[in-house]
Image: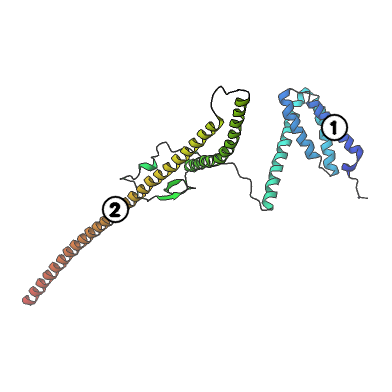
Amino acid sequence: MPPFPILRRSGVHRVACFALSRALLRQIKQLSTPIQRTAREELKAVIRRNAKLQGHKEIAIALKLGYETLDALHNDTRRQHVLKSISELANRRRAENTASITRASYRHGTSRPRLESPKPCISPYPAASKVLDRPFRHLSGRRHVPVLISANRVPMLRLKKPQPPFLSRMIRNLNATREGRTLLAPRLEAEMRIAEDEDTWDRILYTTLGVIDEDGRCWTGAVSYAMEELKWKQDQAIKKRIETAKRMWEIVKKERALAEEEVMKRRREKQRIREERRSVREKEDSVIGGIEAKDVSIAGEKEGAVISAG
């Protein structure tokens, strides 16, 4: 036997608590519809919170507050104050639950919940130039030669990292289109066999009963047209990828040539500046040397004059 009775296991105590909670909910049900929905959920949150109390003093305080709340709900003047108190208790409980979940996830090695960042813009920059318009003759900074790569058989020029979201979306759409066409080919082959059976059945109906289709078209013709159209779209997509890759490769070669030209131009500019500095330094050295020689000659003349005077 425990040294003190556990009230949660007492039938009388449980019946009293259930009766109090039902009376509170029944009284809130008589409120207006918008207030009723909010207050009912908040009161349920408070009841769930107090259902886990074990201390005798805490349970006595909770029951006292419950009976006082029930009396206040019958009074029109005290009703708004009681509803505000219930809302504060429910919000405090939600904050405690959020903090406990955060501490538990951090304790078990999982990452803390992060705020959802706004979705990046996946549309091209309004003033952005097209990639195939390169190379540009004049740039504001140093030229970076793009790299021609294949993103899952989609040719693209990698200019810099990170990759723009718009470009990633375009690559995904192209790959999804190609994958859909690839999966459509075997489906059309299976439908061709079904179309042949349908044409055979139409011929049987025509020979036995004289029934003929009003359109006069065969099933295999429609499937054959779909297969030819699919093959044409695949061939056109392949040709377009090849042409795009060739144009991009030409852009890379032109960019390399311009980059080498700009490197040589920078070197010549640095050499010119270096030579100008050297010439200025030589002029300054010659001027300083002439002044020093003049001072030496003046000093020698003075010394000779002093000796002759002596």
Instruction: Name the residue located 52 percent from the left edge and 32 percent from the top edge.
Output: 221
Q: Front-most of 97 and 135?
A: 135
- Residue 270 relative to residue 5: left or right: left
Where residue 116 sits, quadrant-wise, is: top right
The numbered mark, 2 or 1, whose residue comes first in the sequence reads 1
Percent position of residue 272, x then y? 23, 57
The kind of residue tagged 2 is Glu
Q: Front-most of 53 and 9?
A: 9
Residue 304, placed above or below residue 130: below
Residue carrying label 1? 20
Residue 196, placed above or below residue 57: above
Camera-near label (2 vs 1) is 2
Percent position of residue 249, x then y? 37, 49
Residue carrying label 2? 261
Is residue 67 visible to the viewer in this orientation of the structure? no
- Callout 2: few (<14), some (14-19), or many (20+) C-alpha neighbours within 10 Å? few
The kind of residue tagged 1 is Leu
Compute the Cα span from label 2 to label 1: 89 Å
Instruction: Name the residue located 76 percent from the left edge and 26 percent from the top edge.
Output: 79
Is residue 188 visible to the viewer in this orientation of the structure? yes
> Are the residues tagged 2 and 1 within 8 Å (C-beta)?
no
